[in-house]
Structures are given as structure tokens and as C-alpha cells.
Image: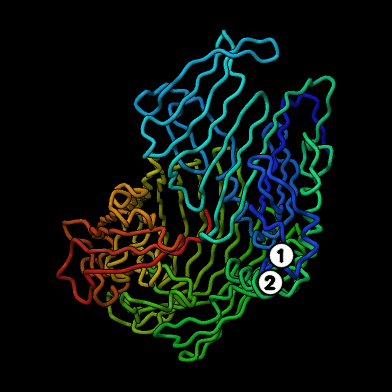
Amino acid sequence: MLFAQDAATETYEKLTFSIAPFPPDLQQNHWLYQYPFLIHHIDSSQYDRQPMLTVSLREKFYANDKLIARRFTGLDNSLDADGDLSAALDLMFRHVDLSGSTFKLMKKTFVNPLSWNRQVYDYYTDTIEIDGTRLLKYSFSPARRSSGGFVGNVLMTPDSLIRQITMQSVGELNIDHVKKIYWQQRQNTEEIYADIRLQGIVPVQAHWWRSVKTLDPPSHLMPMAAQRFSEQYRHQPLNRQESQVDVVVLLLQHSSAYRMLVKPMEIALTDYIPTRFNRMQSRFDFGPVTSLYSYNPVEGSRWRIGGKTTPRMSRLWSADAAVAYGWRDRQFKYQLQLRVDKYSLLHEYDLAVPGEISDNNLFTALRPGVRETQMQYFRKTEFHYADTWTKRLAADLWIRHARYRAAGDLRYQRADDASPLSALETLSLGVKLQFLPMLTLLHQSGGYRISKFSPCHHTELRLEKQFDFNDGAYITLLGATGKIWNKAPFPLLFFPNTNQSLFLRSEAFTTMRPMEFIADEYANLFLTAHLNGLILNHIPLINRLKWRETLSFNAMYGHLTDKNNPQLRPDGLLLLPAETLPFGAAPYLETGFGVENIFKFLRIDFYRRLSYLDAPHIKKWGVRLGLKIGF
């Protein structure tokens, strides 16, 4: 164990979820009468005195902002095997920074009442005395109650030192599932109460509590390496209900209702089937369940079985494995991946469409777009080293060997004499540098073999940015530009990503055919505006549904230089696939309009193609669905 004598701060965070209000008379409840033991675990909320049953407890301890230990227990623990739920909750419940003109609370941006913006807030001033200290009390409330916001007060000393801030939401917040928020900060503690109604059915009260202590370095020793959670890390003891969450969960897990309701929900949300009834005790999970069956024109019906190890098997290493079989091509495909600390090794053999995003699962088998018959088999082995070097710089280094074979209607034909090429072999070294949180630089150097080994280098720069607005609306921007520096056959050139499935995918074009365009110099842009009800909230009756509109705009432009155009310089190149062309003088454009938050989880987008409308075998309109379960 490592210790540091110069530690400056330690932070303790606690997040609980409770069913509230919880029916106190279990015998009269149609669903709960068979759980009489729960009566001994019901308590009253410190926030609104409602009866509640605590079913989840999450604790974290930091030293100088570095996570040292954590402890999760509760009904939601089995839904968080991959950490996705924890990541979402970390974004929802976090320190509120009131130093700027706006602040973020539960992922939504609000105008800061301490900015003294009288267009947004009304202010009232008073003087009070607490423990013999005279304080100035500034109360605030929304200037327009219909728009929603916060009421609260700020307590200050005469020399403008803030003692305490409290805020409580009023009106409609327009945050998924969240009905009401209470936030308070005083001295070194901060807490949030949130009333949540999951999918409009289950009432839940969340309580987040945070405490920061400034330490005296010469007299305090603090662990600086990750370790098991200890009771000494808590800045306040657990109450009786919080300390008995383990008991409540254990009793509920042995009930028939839990097996019938919660277990199917676990499988639906995680997409994996555990090998033990208690998911947290499973060493190996089968899945993804949705990848069991898929369909494409080359393989026909495709069946796949796979799985992955869990941290219960080992916290030092993990592994994924899968095998698939296509009934039409009568070939087995496989995948094996091993991860040890910062290193990973992948070996796989599979089938794909160049330039199409596809996970080969049940959802992508539903394809309103063009069903492409030009595909290629690939056998790939790659070794990765990934690490985060600083808070703002992460790196991924890899070496990759791959072998490609044409499949379906795709052909590898030499451009100089039209003779067939049986396979294309490549070897490359690559590096990806992420300058967090916005920029990513990728470079890949290596080569390929047709008649001889030839070099090939590819550089790409990516940008990702989100712009937040005071009304909760936000815009996401994803862009990339890149260049392939050498002569290369078409499988190694750039094909824009397309999405022909029924479901939304980021950084993919909806109304573009797979392999419709090819380039060795390119730039793309994906813009999505989430307007958070800017229009629909003002339409009578529709505003009660809490639907929210989205606008999308996608653009792409590229250029195929003469050295990679087989019609101009055929030596050492392959003929382009049928109906694959370089970009013309105009960029490719498409736009979309959508509605999200339908039934709290569904999104529907309608897309329209704006350019290259005379191209063969295209669809000018497209419809895509999105599913979002969570906050």
C-alpha cells in the first residue's frame, strides 16, 4: 500500500436510490403483500418525509481527485457489469460549479443565479442572524414561472463570503424522468435530492451527498493507490436503511417476482445471459443476445454464439470469444480477444461491406436501406497498447496484419490486365492520440502486397464538440479530415461510412449507398441539434407528451487523386467496384428531422438526400429509429 504525506484533500461521495413513496401497508398492496419482511426496512425521507425503501447504495472515496476506493451494492448492481450505468450516473450526479454565468445540474445547463441576471431571476434581499453572526440573505425565483427554473436563497457574510446556497426546482425542468430537484451547498458539503419516475411508472428518490475535507499534511496519512473500500473513508456513518441494502437485495433475489421481472430486464439491458443466477457471481456471460441471428445476402441466415469473461473470473485479464456460421456461404467465422492491463490481442475472421457500419445483429438485419451484395472476407490479427498519459492525452498504439478476399459480387481485378487477384495482404503500424476532450489524431503506416510490397500511409484528424445552451438544448459536432498519401488499391482507400439498418448510428450517412463514393482525400461533418422542445413545447396537447425535436445535417466531400484512379494510372491498382465513383464538384449533403423522448425512450428521424439525386439505385428518403433507456 502506498501512502502520501502531502495530500491536500479527500472527498467522499454517496449516492442512494430509494423507492418513494413506498406503500407502508404491504398487506393491502397487490404486488408487495408477499414480501412482509420489507416492513422492517422502510424509513422516512429526510427531504420530504415520505416513506421509502432504499434499494441501492454507491460510495466513492477520492484522494486529491484520484479515485481510491468505491463500493456499489443494490438492485441496480447487476445492470452495471460494464460500467455504463456508473458512467451515466457520474454525469448526472456531480459537483455543481457556480463560478460561471451558467451551471450544469443533472446534465442540463441553467443560468447561474449568482450571475445576478435579472432577466431570468427576481431577487429579494434580507438580513438574518445565525449563531450570533449577521448574514445577508438573497432570495431568488424565476422571472417567468412558466419557463421553469429554481427558487432558493444565498447566505453571505458582510464581506461577501458565501455560507450556504439552496435551490429547489419549480415548473417543468424538461429532464428525462426527473420531476423535482433540490440542491444545497454549505461549507464543505453538497447534496442533491431528485424525484425520478422511471418510464413514468416506478417512483424513485435519489440522494447524492458529497463531502470534501482539507487535510493537514504533516499529521495525516492517506492511501494513494486503489484498494478495497473501508469504513474509515466515510465522512458520515450510514443510517440503518443504507447499511441494510445488502440484506434487502438478498431477500428480494430469492423471490419469484424478482426472477420473473428483474432477470429478463437484466438480459434486455446488458444483452448478456450470465452463467449464474446472481449476475455478480457469474464468471462468464453468453452474448450479445441480439447477435445470435442476423442476415446478409452473402451469408444468408447467420447464427452466432459468443461470450465474455467477467471481473469475477479475473480483474487482471478479460477475454471475448465468438463463433458464427453462414448457411449460404457455408463458412465458419470466429473472434477471440484477450486483454491484460493496457494490452490487448485480437484475432478474427469475418465478413463485411467496405464502408458500412454493421454489427451483424438482429437489429441491423432489419434494413430499409440498400442491401449491398459486394462484400469481403477478412482475417485480421492485431495487438494494441492503450494508455492515458495525462488528464488530456490518451494514446493507442497498434500493429495489424490483415488478409482480404472478395465475396459476393465484389471482384478484385488488376486494372492493367483485368486478371483476378485472389487476396490482398496488408501489414501496418498505427497510433491514435486523443487530445481530450475534443481532438483525435490518427496515423497508420505500413504497406500491402499485390505483386510486390508497396508502402501506404494514412493520416486522419477528428473533432468532437458539444455546444450547450441555457434552455437545455445542445448541438453535437463531429468532423473528420484525412489523406492517404500513397498509391493504394481500392480496399485501402476511403469509403464514407453508411448506415443501411433501421436504427440510428453516429458518424454514418443514412441515404448514401455503401461504396457509392471513394476518395483518398476527404472531409466530413455531422451536426445534430437537440432542441429540447423549443417548438413542440408550445403546441397545445403535444406539449403534454414532452416530445423533443432534433435537426440533423451531414456533409461529405472527397477527392480521388490521379495516382489512385485506375482509369488514369492502372499500374499496381485494382478496378473500382461497380457503381463506385469519385466525388464530383459538389459535396454530398443530407438533412434530417426527428422527434425524441417518445414513450420516454424512442426516437424517430426522417432523412432527405440533398445532392447527387440522379445517382443509380439510391433512396432519397430514409427513416431511422433510436432507443435510449436511461437518463
Residue 59 image offset from top left, x and y in percent: 72, 45
Q: Mark 2 points at which residue?
A: 285
Which secondary structure lies at badge 1?
Answer: loop
Image position, residue 98 (x, y; %) = 51, 27
Numbered disc 2: secondary structure:
strand
Q: Name the residue under label 1.
A: 310
At horizontal 67% and vertical 34% (from top left) the residue drawn is 65
Left or right placement of residue 561 versus residue 178 in this view: left
- Residues under labels 2 and 1: Cα distance? 7 Å
Q: How crowded is mark 2: few (under 14 residues within 10 Å), some or many (20 or more)?
A: some
Residues marked 2 and 1 touching at CB (< 8 Å) = yes
Give the amino acid type for the residue marked by disc 2 in the picture: Asp
Direction from residue 296 to residue 78 in the image, left or right: right
Name the foreground residue: 500 vs 556. Answer: 500
Question: In the figure, 208 relative to 248: above or below?
Answer: above
> Which sits in the foreground, 521 or 621?
621
Image location (x, y in percent) of residue 321: 64, 73
Residue 619: quarter of image:
bottom left
Task: Indicate the amino acid at tag 1.
Answer: Thr
Q: Which quadrant of the view contains residue 63?
A: top right
Q: Is residue 523 above or below residue 267?
A: above
